[in-house]
Amino acid sequence: MSTANALKPSQRMKIPRAKSAEQDAHERACNFLEVALGFSVEQALSEATRCLECKDPVCMTGCPVNVDIRSFLQLMMVEDYAGAVRKIRESNYLPAICGRVCPQETQCEAVCTMGKKHEPVAIGKLERFVADYESLRGLFVPPAGAPQRAEKVAIVGSGPSGLTCAAELAQKGYQVTVFEALHEVGGVLRYGIPEFRLPRTVLDMEIGRVKDLGVEILTNFVVGMTATLDELMDTWGFSAIYLGTGAGSPSFMEIPGEGLIGVYSANEFLTRVNLMRAYAFPDTDTPVRIGKHVAVIGGGNTAMDAVRTSLRLGAEKAYLVYRRSRTEMPARDEEIHHAEEEGVEFLLLTNPLRILGNEKHEVRGMECQRMELGEPDSSGRRKPVPIPGSEFVLEVETVIEAVGQSPNPIVQSTTPGLKTGRKGVVEVGEKQETSRRGVFAGGDLSRGGATVILAMKDGKTAAAAIDEYLNGKRDLVVVAPETAVPQTARS
Amino acid sequence: MFKIREKEFLSPTIARFVIEAPFIAPKRKPGNFVILRVSERGERIPITLVDSDPGAGTVTLIVQGIGKTTKELLTKNVGDAIPDVVGPLGKPTPIHTNETIVCVGGGVGTAELLPITRALHAAGNIVYSIVGARSRDLIILEQEMAAASDELFMTTDDGSYGRKGFVTDQLRDLLTSRKVDTVYAIGPLPMMKAVSGVTKDAGVKTVVSLNALMVDGTGMCGGCRVSVGGKMRFACVDGPEFNAHEVDFDELIIRNRSYSEHERESVQRFEESHACQARGAEVAP
């Protein structure tokens, strides 16, 4: 393969990994502007040059949607940044989002050859760079579309999975309609992920690109209630349906005191702030209660989002309460690191027992217990065991629980014959097919709780299967209930 | 956008709206509600679907101006549009047959009760209804409730109309004089709690519709969680109707006060800006 890179591998290895500028930790903890500022053109070019252009680009296999990383980096090396993002968009229609929220450190960058002896190429930051570069300079060119098809496909849910499936199918020429229950588009990207990680302008821009492909998006439409799945097929004339309704139903710890004023699920808290813009109350109508001291329970990305949001709403003290140790935390390292920098206090090996209130039934404290790590449990993580006599009361006025979510039950409960497993997770086969003919599902709805990129991967797989299905191979893609395999949660 | 086709004040603070909602209209069942947003910066609030006309593609809502959003809604007129209306949401009322049923409505809760009363009456049940309000000017839907009931009893707290006293006074009398299978009660939480107390003593099954705080209305936020029979349930997807005798009313009453200070601030700001607009209109040519 010819290379535009004149440097020898040994020279490339000497180039240090570029560091993206970030807003100052103290400053950013008081605003909702993006934390990571992204690469300059010079940084991006230097970073792309570090790529060793491996004959066997293992980074591609590390990417759930198999972005041709080597090719996009080679285009960057010749400073064709718009060409680079077009190359990414061939396999990933949401590059500005993925460049920001993907856990690259456990995917493409984890297997990068450069990473064996040095730091891996900053693939994620480069993806973000080319997407932003194209957008800022107005260089977007829509991909060439396939001839129009007569078949209509319905996508349920406008989160990352649904948007990806919609973009893929629209490029294949299908008539695609996305149904969204909320009044704004984007699903978890809109209500869940805060603006300091994913600015609304970036989200709107990428949704706009999907709409530009001819995709119709109907908001304020709850499939299962406004129309059932069967009605979409029989009355509305959809030939196939993709379900990407996510895992939006919050779990609670079910400890005493959860009925007190000032206790939130992370979903409610983040929805109030992100979707309803409660940070601008009373200029907006949706309020949120934020105490001087806030405790967020959990160790995942949602917990990090909630605790960092608390600081930005003016909490003087924000605690992250997690019953295991830092190594067991499912959150991305970068998010944990950012939370620490911003002043979040981590109370690890700490388990909440009950929430305490005052005479007005407002939260005033949370009784916790210290834990130690015992033997590994079924998840392979060491099980936390309470230390007797270690109870103490944490003074807080707001408690936010980020202890897991399960799929929203509305579609499942209104669709006869749709096979579900534990917690209402929809069972799917290898091609994301469900037990209902012509109905496919993916993302958190079939995984129970995973990442944006895995949801996108499912949307892509389903789009290919729907295409196959609508091209006449109708029997190939109906999962027999006994062959349905629940996908593993949390990858 | 959801255009307002008709608007009519039923009392100085309560209005009936007929709104274009072609997808929702054919799907509405008694007990369902919608979530709506009145402006681009607005909050999402649940409002019961009182009626629908699938042919015309419209739904009927009855709204009392209490908070900022409902007050703002009352300023909207025929031809104006509501940006967001989503539904129908919530589990529809299971319609019993061959029963003697008492339907108890308090204040604007009567609007929520009307479609249920109609459905129960149409299904051949014997339906006695009690409609109560603080005073005569807050009584709504008397004729409609009368048409949907075998007998209708009116009460006002101040005695300005019907029987002086509370709906529970009338209910106690009915429970002693007639054999009642089920009671439906919709109104302010303290009223539903009081009704529940009366019927629990009398051993009569009672259903209430809970107006908990909601954001999305589809089971995603958990803000509407209520304790029913000691278990956490979401009013939006598990309800809004529950067995009254299992509901922890005190907890819900407290939770519904979560934002009372915010609400006051919001209402004050709205009324100030609204007064300015009104003054502006006066001086305009």
Image: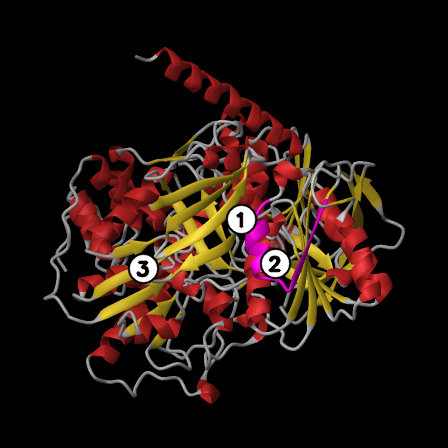
Q: Earlier in the sequence, mark 1 or mark 2?
A: 1
Whether tag 1 and tag 2 are in contact, CB under 8 A, the answer is: yes
Q: Quadrant of the N terminus of chain B?
A: top left
Q: Quick one: A235 or A276, which is closer to the camera? A: A235
Question: Which segment is the magenta one?
Answer: B140-155
Question: Hey, what amino acid is under mark 2?
Answer: Pro
Q: CA distance from mark 1 to mark 2?
A: 11 Å
In the rendering, which numbered label is found on residue B46?
A: 1
Q: Are marks 1 and 2 on the same chain?
A: yes
Residue B152: in magenta span = yes
Task: Tell me where residue B129 sits by quadrant.
Answer: bottom right
| Chain under callout 1 | B
Q: CA distance from mark 3 to mark 1?
A: 24 Å
Whether residue A288 is visible to the viewer of this picture, yes or no, is: yes
- Identify which residue is drawn at 74% across, 48% down: B191
In the rendering, which numbered label is found on residue A178?
A: 3
In the rendering, which numbered label is found on residue B131?
A: none
Q: Where is residue A243 shown, x and y percent of the image?
A: 39, 67
**What element does badge 3 sit on?**
strand
Q: Farthest right residue?
A: A389
In the rendering, which numbered label is found on residue B240?
A: 2
- Identify which residue is drawn at 29% across, 36% down: A43
**What element does badge 2 sit on?**
loop
Question: Hey, what amino acid is under mark 1?
Answer: Pro
